[in-house]
Amino acid sequence: MSETPAAPATPEPEGPAPRARATTDASPSGPTAPKDAAPDRKPAGLAPIPIPAPPPPPPKLIDFRPDDPAPIRTATLWAALAAGILSMVLLGEGLAVNGLVVAVPATLAVYFAGRRAGRRPRSWALVWGLGGLALLIVPALHAAEWPTFFAVVAALAAGSLALHGGRSWPAVLLGPIGVLTSLVTGPAWAWQGLRERVGGDRGRLVPVLRALVVATVLLVVFGTLFAGADAAFADLLGALVPDVSVSDGPWRILLFALGLFGTLAAARTAAAPARWDRVQVPAGRARGRVEWALPLVGLVALFAVFNAVQLAVLFGGYDAVLKETGQTYAQYARQGFWQLLMATLLTLLVIVLALRWAPRTRSSDRTLVRGVLGTLCALALVVVASAVRRMDMYVEAYGLTRLRISVLAMELWLGLVIVLIIAAGVWGARWLPRAVAASAVAGVLVFGLASPDALIAERNVERYETTGRFDLPYARGLSADAVPALDRLEEPMRSCVLWDIKEGLDEGGRLPWYATSWGEAEARRILDARPPVVGADGPACGELGPEYYR
């Protein structure tokens, strides 16, 4: 015998309901019981016991991990294998057109994996993908290694963004390195698919492997015989087939592993990308108007005074300023640029922090934020223009170098970011993260296609023709991209500059067509047509005098 209470955890209601229940439960012999108790008072023993509220659940961690991918396709496996083999065969001598050749099977592997997972390329994914492929044109055109490094890194970042997608700041900042999370899971995913295929389709896979081995043996045997029989065919075969020696074995194996595992990681990411858009950045605590606006208004006033001085110098001329400060033209230019570059960077940091702590309790707060930060951005653009002008003065005094052209490009890009921030304040900031990332990719692409070493040589040759001053030791360290501009110099300066570049090309030897950039091929053509004078690296160049080394 057990009783089942109707609601044991619910407190008894107050009011007439308790009295009605007491009357129902009373015995027939107890009519006098209500006389001993107040009719409207609830007995103390039946008072409701307050039940404490359950503690709030702990905050859930944001799960941005990728989902389980669909099984890998056979076409993806073959494309990844082709990318590894091409990397091993073509990338050993350097990077040029071969980068684009390796990118073709890697792109196909990504496409096959994405289609198997039901993903379709969106507009921004196409933008990132095409931008990454365009960046690989830089090493195909130019011989300088430092812009090639920036272009390859930007190409990998753009490709990773194409695989992940996303429009928020966490997605744009983490997406370029997101493919690294698949460097282990990608090969494991491929191995699982390969085991399934070998276990179920052994009868079809083994004949294919035997056919590949037989085809390789036949091509090697008959190709060797034909090369020994005809010199023209031997030259053609030597130009098409890379020269692989035993000593290059470890390096070639490493290139094969990089191509294969990198392609598998990209394909695994395309099949199941990490969800970086799920990463939420907590909003900053809104500040009061006075606490937020007072420091910014003071900064705006300081910017306004500085820009007024810059405009006065611009229209009044630099001679008066130099006379008052006692500085030379070159000293004034060198002193100003680096401080203005740092001021631009700090301005962007101030804008980011100001937006995080901006007041947002009333509708008029938005107008205040737009007005103050819009004014600050507009004044920051004047600072950017002043910094660019200072660098131009710096180059006029000392010539153009790799560092100077790099920081100048950085300053121009920062100015473009400020313009995008101003536009976001007018039309909304939903598109801002991807626009900033796209501007960075486009900036690296333009910088690489412009051939910085060629620009440096062109500017310094023009300076030499105007002032008679030339930094000969620095020009000797430029790449083959600078040869067309340096070829305009008169002797003996021309031979003194080009001798070291020619020696560097001769030490590297004649590379295969797929590892030779257009800039290197053009430099070899010019130097073969007009080789430097023998002995140009000796006393003849030292007799030019110190005026050439400024």
Image (cartoon, rainbow, N blue to C red):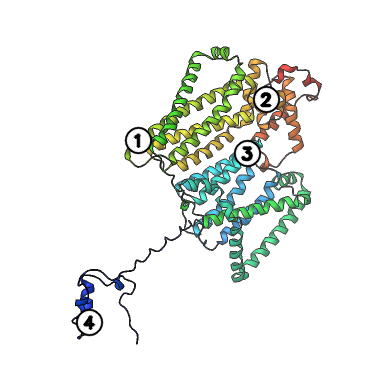
Q: Compare marks 1 and 3 and give the one earlier in the sequence.
A: 3
For discs 1 and 2, the disc positioned in front in the rendered view: 1
Identity, as a three-letter code, of the amino acid under mark 1 = Thr
Q: Mark 3: few, some, or many residues within 10 Å (few <14, many ≥20)? A: many
Residue bearing the label numbered 2: 486
The reply to whether callout 1 and callout 3 are in contact (CB within 8 Å) is no
Identity, as a three-letter code, of the amino acid under mark 2 = Leu
Residue bearing the label numbered 4: 26
Cα separation between marks 3 and 4: 96 Å
For discs 1 and 3, the disc positioned in front in the rendered view: 1
The reply to whether callout 3 and callout 2 are in contact (CB within 8 Å) is no
**Residue at point 75% right, 24% down?**
496
Say if 134 sits above or below 17 in the image.
Answer: above
190 and 99: which is toward the camera: 190
Residue bearing the label numbered 3: 148
The reply to whether callout 1 and callout 2 are in contact (CB within 8 Å) is no
For discs 3 and 2, the disc positioned in front in the rendered view: 3
Q: Compare marks 4 and 2 and give the one earlier in the sequence.
A: 4
Q: Quadrant of the N terminus?
A: bottom left
394 and 241: which is toward the camera: 394
The reply to whether callout 4 and callout 2 are in contact (CB within 8 Å) is no
**Residue at point 47% right, 43% down?**
434
Cα separation between marks 1 and 3: 45 Å
Identity, as a three-letter code, of the amino acid under mark 3 = Thr
